[in-house]
Each structure stands twice: as C-alpha cells, then as structure tokens.
Image (cartoon, rainbow, N blue to C red):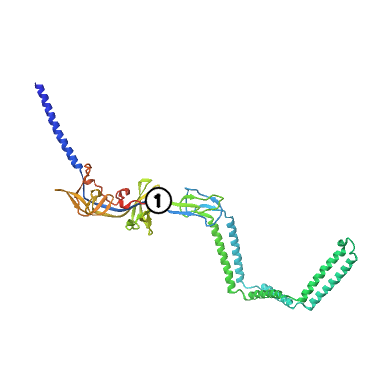
C-alpha cells in the first residue's frame, strides 16, 4: 500500500509540473507573437550623405590614333599590340627614297638662289661691262645692216652669183642634150651635172630675189628687240641692281628655304614616334603595303577616367572637384577614388530623359585596371551632420491627404504623428519636424509575422566614408550607362 501511494504522489507532481510548464510555454508563445506583430526603431541623430550615382566604362586619360603625315609604303614596323613604349620611341618607318631625293633637290635650289642673290648684290666687274657693251654694239650693227639692206655691193654680188649659176646650168643642159638619146642616160655624169647645176641656179635666184626685196617688218622688229635687251643689260650693270631686283632675289632665297624645310619635315614625318609613354592598343600597318590611318593606336594606362551620364535633376548639384568613389565590376573588392573633372554643357536625350556627360578623373592606383571595364561611380555631393534620421520602411502615407506620417510608441499606446521629411538616401530619411531624438517608432506587420528590430540595430552613416557605393544608390539616382 505504501509503495502504491508513493507512485500516485509522483504522478500528481508530474501532472502539476506539466501544467505549470504548459502555462509558461503558452505565455512565452503569446509574448513572442505579440512582439512579432510589430517592428520598432528609435529616432537617432546621424550623418546623411547626399550622393549622385551613375555608371560607365573606364577609359585612359590619354589615347591617340597615330598616322603618317606623308604617303608611302611601310618599310619597317618596330612594335606590336600590347608592347609598352616610351615617349620618342620609333614605332614604324616608311620608304624614304623619293623623300631623300626631294631633300637633295631642295638643297641645290637653295644654293642656286643664294648665289643669284650674292651676284645681284655685287657691283659689275670691268670685264662684265666690256662684254655687255660688245653685245650691245653687235646687236645694233646687225640691226643697222638689216635695215639698210640690200646694199649695192650685196645686190651686185647676188646678181653675179645668179648669172654664174645660169651659165653653168646652160652648159650642163647642152652636155646632157648631146647624150640624151642613150639608154643609160640616167646613170651618166651629164645627167648628174645637170641636176647639180639646176639646184645651184635655184639657190642663186632665191638669194638674189631676197636681196632685192629687203628685210621684212618681223625681221626688223626681232633685230630691234635684241638691241633693246642688250642695252637694258648694259645699263643694269652700269647702274647696279634695283630694289625690285634685290627683292626678287631675296624672295627666291626665302622660297628655296621653305622648300627645303618642307622636304626635311616630310622626311621626318616618314618616321612614326610615340608622343608619350603608353601601350600599343591597335596596329594597322603591314610592311610593303601603303600606310593607312590610323596606323597605330596608343593608350596611356597610367591614369584612367570615366564619363557617365547624369540626370538633369542631379547635374545641377555637381561641381568640379567633388570627390567620388568608384567600384569596378571586374574588381569588386577594390574601391577607387577620384574627382569630378568636367561637367558637360550639351545634353543628350534617352527615352525621354535628359542627361549630361560628367567626367570623373580617377586618382593614381596600383589596381590592375583595363580600358573598357564597367564601373559604378558615386559622387559625394554633401554631408548633413547631426540630423534626425529614420528608416524609410517606418514611413507611411495618409491615403486621404497623401502626406507622410509615422506611428510613435507612447506610454498611452501607439499614435500617428505627421512628419515633415527632407532628403531621402540609402534607406534613410531626414526628419525636419514632427519627431525628437529617442522617439520609438512602430510599424505593425500586416501579415502578423515579422522580426523585431532593436533601436540600436539601425545602420546610420557616420564619418566621411559611409557605406559602399552600391548600398548608397537610390531610386532617384538609377545608374545610367553612357
């Protein structure tokens, strides 16, 4: 009996304990469901960073398409794609055979022009004057003889030559007549003598007629021009060079100098050199083929920049020199820094939205950057310090008025409070009025299940660094690729 009594006592204790445990578990479950039905957060002060975000591609600060300034066939190519080169290094050459000949010709022309100028600047020598005088008097005498022709003596001489030729012709004709019946007459000397006599007579007759006729007006004019030319040369030597003569000689020298410089530059242009330290990005030259443009593309990969398109609403907030944080898609663990270098003045339109190009110059870095890599840019416009901040998930909108409000926890319970909000960035909103630091906000979960958030768990942005750029993007600044 005693043993059975102890058994009942133990059973009774177990039942009591089970009941107490069930009550405790029910209370804990009820409390958990009550806590899970709401989400709370405390109003805190912090720093809100105002940023503008966009995206683009890396491009080198310096990139140039190189080409020859003269045409020709490629004789030598010294580099290939991917080669690093130094400023002034020879990249390629053209065949310079014709250019070298042009240079030699220009040098000879310069020497000739300089000699002519020196001659014009020197007074005439005695020998030169005497030679010029002789040329003048000779031309004058020829003109006078032509003008006075024919003279009686020349006319008589021409007539005598004509009579002589006539007698010789008659004798030849008589000799020919005596043997003209022979079948071989064409091969006999009498036939040949008759032909020679006939020609001599015709020449003598023409000379006599010309002498009897006298000179033509064209012959007299040509002879007089020779006289005037010889006289002008003689006077020029006597009087020395005129200002016009010296100016003409000097201009010829200057023109020869220009031709020589042009030939030298053309020869130099047949050698393509690197204008700066860089990497060969493209090559379009083939030895033996005509040179094309662009011949070589050279990039300076020591520094990069990014050109992004910024919405017209945000571009008015930007200024040259504003800091920026850049992340590269290919290097997610690397944060780069830079500054706003240029803000475009001409807009582009895409899908009805208006954008302006903004150039971000990256600071020097050892990161393995390459041209064309996709990158995201966050430009830090300004910081709002010591601001009342609340998470945007705590904000609700009055459907009747469209104005924002929040639910504040008080000793009497939860009450709606209208608030005036300022800037919203990265999931937080600036509170201009309606709340105080330390106020606890409540958001009731419509589904009946959510996780309570302790007031201290809200992430504020303190300091100049702030969160990573990808966390700071907002709906107002959707990334736009140029």
Q: Residue furthest left?
A: 1
Q: Residue furthest top?
A: 1
Whole-percent x and y of residue 213? 76, 76
Eyeballing the image, is 445 above or below 66? above
Asked which quadrant contains residue 422, the reply is: bottom left
Asked whether residue 358 is in view, the answer is no
Camera-side residue of 266 and 478: 478
Camera-side residue of 420 and 223: 420
Whether residue 84 sits left or right of residue 40 in the image: it is right
Eyeballing the image, is 3 above or below 69? above
Q: Residue furthest front?
A: 400
Whether residue 278 sits left or right of residue 449 in the image: it is right
Whether residue 90 sits left or right of residue 218 in the image: it is left
Residue located 79% across and 76% down the image: 155
Asked whether residue 285 is in view, the answer is yes
Camera-side residue of 48 and 105: 48
Eyeballing the image, is 45 above or below 155? above
Q: Which residue is mark 1?
A: 58
């Amino acid at each position: 009996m005693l043993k059975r009594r102890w058994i009942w006592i133990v059973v009774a204790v177990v039942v009591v304990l089970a009941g107490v445990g069930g009550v405790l578990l029910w209370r804990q479950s009820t409390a958990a469901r009550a806590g899970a039905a709401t989400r709370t957060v405390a109003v805190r002060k912090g720093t809100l960073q105002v940023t503008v975000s966009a995206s683009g591609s890396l491009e080198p600060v310096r990139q140039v398409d190189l080409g020859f300034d003269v045409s020709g066939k490629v004789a030598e190519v010294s580099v290939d794609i991917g080669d690093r080169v130094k400023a002034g290094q020879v990249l390629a050459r053209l065949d310079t055979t014709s250019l070298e000949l042009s240079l030699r010709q220009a040098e000879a022309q310069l020497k000739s022009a300089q000699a002519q100028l020196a001659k014009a600047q020197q007074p005439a020598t005695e020998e030169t004057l005497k030679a010029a005088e002789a040329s003048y008097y000779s031309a004058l005498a020829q003109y006078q003889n032509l003008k006075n022709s024919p003279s009686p003596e020349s006319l008589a001489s021409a007539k005598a030559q004509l009579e002589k030729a006539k007698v010789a012709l008659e004798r030849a004709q008589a000799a020919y007549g005596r043997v003209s019946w022979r079948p071989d007459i064409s091969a006999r000397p009498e036939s040949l003598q008759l032909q020679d006599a006939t020609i001599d007579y015709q020449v003598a007759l023409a000379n006599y007629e010309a002498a009897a006729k006298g000179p033509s007006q064209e012959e007299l004019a040509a002879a007089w021009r020779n006289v005037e030319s010889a006289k002008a040369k003689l006077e020029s030597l006597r009087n020395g060079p005129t200002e016009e003569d010296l100016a003409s000689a000097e201009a010829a020298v200057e023109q020869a100098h220009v031709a020589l410089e042009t030939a030298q530059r053309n020869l130099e242009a047949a050698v393509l050199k690197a204008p700066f330290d860089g990497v060969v990005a493209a090559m379009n030259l083939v030895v033996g083929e005509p040179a094309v443009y662009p011949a070589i593309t050279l990039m300076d990969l020591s520094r990069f920049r990014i050109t992004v398109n910024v919405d017209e609403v945000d571009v008015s907030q930007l200024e040259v020199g504003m800091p920026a944080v850049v992340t590269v898609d290919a290097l997610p663990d690397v944060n780069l820094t830079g500054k706003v270098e240029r803000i475009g003045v001409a807009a582009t339109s895409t899908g009805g939205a208006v954008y302006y190009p903004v150039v971000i110059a990256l600071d020097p870095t050892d990161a393995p950057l390459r041209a064309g890599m996709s990158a995201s840019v966050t430009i830090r416009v300004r910081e709002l310090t010591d601001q009342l901040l609340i998470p945007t998930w705590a904000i609700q909108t009055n459907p009747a008025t469209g104005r924002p409000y929040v639910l504040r926890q008080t000793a009497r319970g939860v009450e709606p409070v209208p608030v005036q909000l300022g800037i919203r960035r990265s999931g937080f909103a600036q509170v201009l009025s309606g709340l105080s630091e330390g106020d606890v906000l409540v958001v009731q979960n419509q589904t009946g299940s959510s996780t309570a958030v302790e007031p201290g768990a809200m992430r504020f942005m303190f300091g100049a660094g702030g969160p990573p750029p990808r966390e700071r993007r907002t709906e107002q600044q959707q990334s736009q690729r140029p």
